[in-house]
Image (cartoon, rainbow, N blue to C red):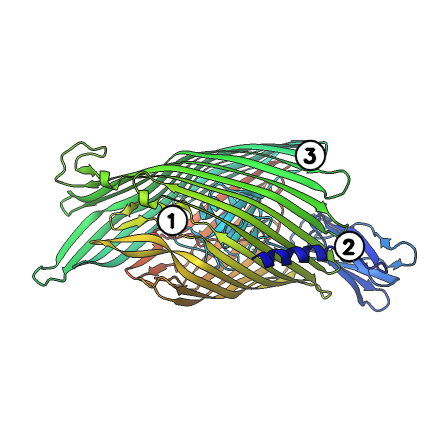
Amino acid sequence: MRRLFFLVLACCFSAGLFAQNANQWTVTGKVTDEATGEPVEFANVVVHSQKDAAVAGYSTTNAKGAYSVNCAKKGDYYLEVSFVGYETFKSASFSLADGSKNFRPDDILLRPSGFELEEVEVTGKKRQIVYKLDKKVIETAGNIAASGGTAIDLLSQTPSVKVDADGEVTFRGSSGFKVYIDGKPSTLTGSAALDQIPAEHIENIEIITTPSARNEADGIAGIINVVTKKQLQNGWSGMLNVKGSTVGTRGVDFLTSYRKNNVTWQTTGEVARRYRKSDFDQTRNVHTDTITANTHSYGTRESYNDNYGLRSGLSWDKNNTTWSASVEGRYGVRNRGGGLNYEDHYTFDNAAYSPVQDNYRGGDYVRLDEWTVRADVGFDHSFTNKKGHKLTGSFFLFRDGDAMEFFYTDLFDSNGNQAKGHRAEEFEYRLTAQGNLDYINPINDRGGKFEAGYYYYSYTEDGDYNIWFYNPDYTGDSKYGQGFEYRADLYADYVFRRDVHALYSILSNVHGQFSYQVGLRGEYRYRKLGSEVAKDAAHVWHDFDLFPSIHTAYELKTGGRLNLSYSRRVTQPQLFFMEPYVVYVDYSTAQCGNPKILPEYINSYEFTYSKGFGDHSVSGTLFHRTRFDKIERLRIPYETGVVLDSMANVGNDYSTGAEVATSFQLKKWWSLDINGSLFDYRVKNDLKINGTDRQSLNWQVALNNNFDIGKSTRLRLEGYYVGPSVSTQGRVNEFCYFNLSVRQQFLDKKMTATLNFRDILSTSKYVRTDMYSRTGIQPHYPSIMLSVTYLFNNFKVKGGGNERADHDMFEGTNR
């Protein structure tokens, strides 16, 4: 590792010694959207010889629409600028001669495709996925299939993204990703964080699969950064969204903003319930000691997430510094369960005992209530001595107090008398603090820069667990009524602390058509788990490690772009992976953490090609990921009719495959998007108990048709096929479904109504098997969502874009 450290540093310093060829001429300028005046990023800028149209130089625009093209010799030239969704621009002829080595033509205005002057109607659309040096950007503008949904809906069409029956998002087979909002880490994790961001508030989503050294090293699948909409014009503006569905989803959210010169104030809020309902069917076979229990449970399962949130933030510019502060309060409820029928059949190894059959009616539920408060402060200071020379910093404090997770089960016999049941409570108090300081120093005027920074993270959680079981012979006092006996022997407590300190440095530069970024991050990680009851589980763990990253890009003269990247990552075990006590999720499923579990370490490699062809685009990615000490849930027999789920480092896994995203403008009124992924997934199981080496070929395809029916009406038809996948102990079958969406705009496009029909052919069915059970889930049909959006004052939503969809229609997979 030390050799790698010095090698990276040597590359950084040697790369900075390159100098620009003194015999070159440089053509610089800016490209903007003719309709909106906004910069156009990643437009292709080509310098052609006036004599024979030969390519003399090539570049792409940056986030500010700026470009710089080097030409090797003097002569007469012209510019050609193109980008998906815009008409190709061709400039007048200009000359490069002796004397000045720099030439700057007038700013270039790109006209969107289909732009009609007499009607001022823009029908062109933006590129579906934009590839940058260290990330890809999912454009969400003009989305109709995700209307009324969340960030999960917007991500679902992305290649290799899969949403399971509980709404859990996985990317290339892993759920270990970090969620950021406007570049700041979310205090929630994974799918829970994405599910609380209304789709209408999102400008775009950045997926960073090989994060640079700038980003925290935690997260196997990388980072998902959600960029929210902001209003940059003076005055009041905002939007109001109302939604409801036939299965019970409903909500209201709003975004309002006020800007006056250098001060901006923005407030967002939401009151919503996201609801799922499914038919559930599960068979389970568990053998313990001398008894085999065969159980069959079936019925209707449902889940809902209630979210009540309010956030307000203020930013102001003064003396080359932007200051920001915000506060957010939120109350959330997550509930899962349902009324089921249970058929239990018990057989005995001893033939002297006859089989026993029990039938019950009842249900099991899990509910989490939590109040949270978060406060953020930050600054962004630009030095006046050099353009791009800046220092930024941010800090947030997050408190999640009085959170309670409640589990309960009731089973009644055919006469309506209670036969079994339990109640369990887990109280939690959480406190999170995080801060960072980042410095950027440009090293030349071609985009080269040196970055360095410090990162601090601290998380503390204190909790305890209590449980009551139904015992018909118990006659004492009970918090939950007659017969519920408190089990003091199962009481548990814990205190958990995790700290991270990190330093990083990055060197990036541009040499003609080639650009690179090389970085190194060093992290010291500390964790401590204590318990008065489970003293054997108490431990202290700490470690220091290095995480290098390399990103390169090459702009082809033919108009394409190549990206090659590498990143080393780590996945820290979450606390519930380590909680040292048994929790009964329902009467037949228990969970227990593993306090000695180790982190996962990941190496990720990617190679990407992307190119636009007028109104069409294609991009493809080859990737390979290795993961060591893979963390996975394992299931074993625990008691009669009960299985125990726990976490373990099961071995290593390997993912190798390809992703493709294409977009075609077949007609002015018809666009077609085809996305797909295919990857080989292998698990090498070193923990040979109840698990084996597994392999599967995973693939999925999304086919999306968008039809513009007049100026104010759009229709979308989408189809999905998701192939099978495996783990060390089980398999999830393939499934497919089709969605239909219709959007209508009113009141000079200030009001938009969208109707979404999900799984219109009722073909979706989720089936999972493992060593002890088979679970089938069929969503209730029909599922129809109506959402209405109203824009007021000068709030503007970018038009065009591709629509996304959502696999999140099942409920009940955690059984």
| 603, above or below 407, in the image | below
Q: Which residue is mark 2?
A: 68
- Residue 747, position in %: x, y? 59, 40
| Kind of residue sitting beneath label 1 | Phe
Instruction: Locate residue 419 relative to residue 699 in the image: left or right.
Output: left
* Residue found at the very far front of the displayed protein: 2
Q: Nearer the viewer, mark 2 or mark 3?
A: 3
- Where residue 577 is drawn, which disc sits there? 1
Q: Nearer the viewer, residue 563 or 16?
A: 16
Residue 686, by quadrant, is: bottom left
- Where residue 37 is drawn, which disc sits there? none
* Label pair 2/1, CB-CB below 8 angstroms: no
Residue 485, by quadrant, is: top left
Q: Which residue is mark 3?
A: 321
| 288, above or below 537, in the image | below
Residue 259, by quadrant, is: top right
